[in-house]
Image (spheres, grey):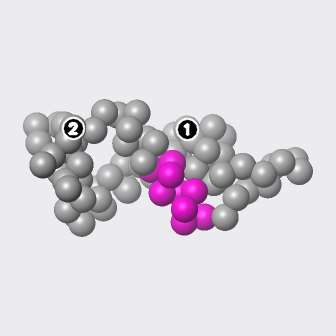
Amino acid sequence: MKRELLDWELDNMYEEFLSEVFQPVSICGYEYEAGKALRTVDPIAFRCGCADWLDNEITEGTIEEVDGKYYLVD
């Protein structure tokens, strides 16, 4: 069964992916999850990375695109 993913869900999935892959980052002595840091500090880089990640997920078959909408494939 496929479930449509909203834009904010895709962003959250990418943020979570980054936080799983990369170690927390330190900014001025404070630690932040990598995904949250990138999303906050450089939203343009976050969006570009999210687009690349989404393309990869489509290629891997975990997400499907139909008419500009994205679906999680179970």
Query: Is 42 placed above or below 29 here?
Result: above
Q: Which mark is residue 4?
A: 2
Which stretch is magenta? 14-22
Query: Is 28 placed above or below 57 here?
Result: above
Q: Is residue 62 visible?
A: yes
Q: Position of residue 23 (x, y in %)?
A: 66, 64
Gap in Å between the C-alphas at discs 1 and 2?
24 Å
Residue depicted at 55% across the width and 38% down the height: 43
Q: Is residue 67 magenta?
A: no
Q: Is residue 17 magenta?
A: yes
Mark 2 Cα shell of 10 Å, populated few (<14), some (14-19), many (≥20): some
Give the quarter of the image for residue 59.
Answer: bottom left
Give the quarter of the image for residue 24.
Answer: bottom right
Q: In this figure, which residue is indicated by the disc labeled 1?
A: 43
Looking at the rendered structure, the kind of residue marked 1 is: Pro
Q: Nearer the viewer, residue 63 or 67?
A: 63
Q: Earlier in the sequence, mark 1 or mark 2?
A: 2
Q: Position of residue 2 (x, y in %)?
A: 15, 46
SS for dot 2: strand
